[in-house]
């Protein structure tokens, strides 16, 4: 499998330039960053949450841990981690565990971490375990500009803090 067709169409529709980065098969976003020789803070991972109102894709650097309570506080919800078995219906053209950070392409609500707005290059899963999509900061911000964002994650090197 290569880049998900839904992503191709979304990026074309939005007029965003991107490149594909190939790497060996990996199970996680952090491992994909290592395999592709990119800093893990430039890898935007997607964490899928759910509650009775639906799903939310939380987007944060692969070097960080999601603070679900911060997401709930920001969105006024009671979200919890969704199971990988639930991803198949939401991300039908993606392999399990390779959810792209562009949840809006799939009609899923997104919240993203502010740390990503300062990163020059952003890489996201392309829908499989062997490819990443590279976006420059301007393109990433164009895709995410209308979506809610705040600090939703902590970095083990810095610790948990919130503005």
Image (cartoon, helix red, strand yellow):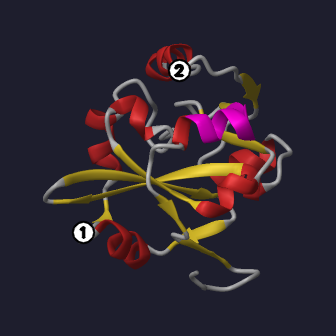
Query: Is residue 97 part of the magenta span, yes or no?
Result: no
Earlier in the chain: of badge 1 and badge 2, it is 2
Judge left or right: residue 87 versus residue 51.
right
Q: Quarter of the image containing the N terminus?
A: top right
Count of labels in the image: 2
Distance between the alpha carbons at the discs numbered 1 and 2: 29 Å
Identify the secondary structure beneath mark 1. loop
Q: Nearer the viewer, residue 21 or 129?
A: 21
Residue 127 point in image, percent of width and height: 52, 31
Instruction: Judge the density around disc 2: few (<14), some (14-19), many (≥20) Cα neighbours within 10 Å.
Output: few
Q: Nearer the viewer, residue 40 or 13?
A: 13
**Residue carrying label 2:** 14
Q: Residue at x 27, y 46 (%)?
A: 86
Q: Nearer the viewer, residue 96 or 53?
A: 53
Q: Which region of the structure is painted magenta?
A: 133-142
**Residue carrying label 1:** 77
Residue 88 point in image, percent of width and height: 31, 36
On the question of residue 28 being in view, the answer is: no
Q: Quarter of the image containing the C terminus?
A: bottom right
Q: Residue at x 26, y 58 (%)?
A: 50
């Amino acid at each position: 499998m290569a880049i998900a067709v839904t992503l191709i169409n979304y990026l074309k529709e939005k007029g965003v330039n991107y490149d594909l980065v190939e790497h060996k098969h990996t199970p996680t976003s952090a491992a994909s960053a290592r395999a592709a020789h990119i800093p893990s803070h430039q890898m935007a991972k997607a964490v899928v949450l759910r509650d009775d109102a639906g799903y939310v894709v939380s987007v944060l650097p692969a070097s960080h841990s999601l603070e679900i309570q911060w997401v709930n506080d920001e969105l006024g919800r009671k979200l919890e981690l969704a199971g990988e078995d639930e991803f198949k219906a939401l991300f039908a053209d993606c392999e399990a565990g390779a959810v792209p950070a562009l949840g809006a392409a799939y009609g899923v609500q997104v919240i993203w971490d502010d740390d990503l707005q300062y990163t020059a290059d952003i890489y996201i899963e392309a829908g499989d375990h062997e490819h990443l999509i590279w976006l420059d900061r301007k393109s990433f911000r164009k895709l995410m500009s209308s979506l809610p964002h705040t600090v939703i994650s902590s970095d083990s090197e810095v610790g948990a803090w919130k503005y």
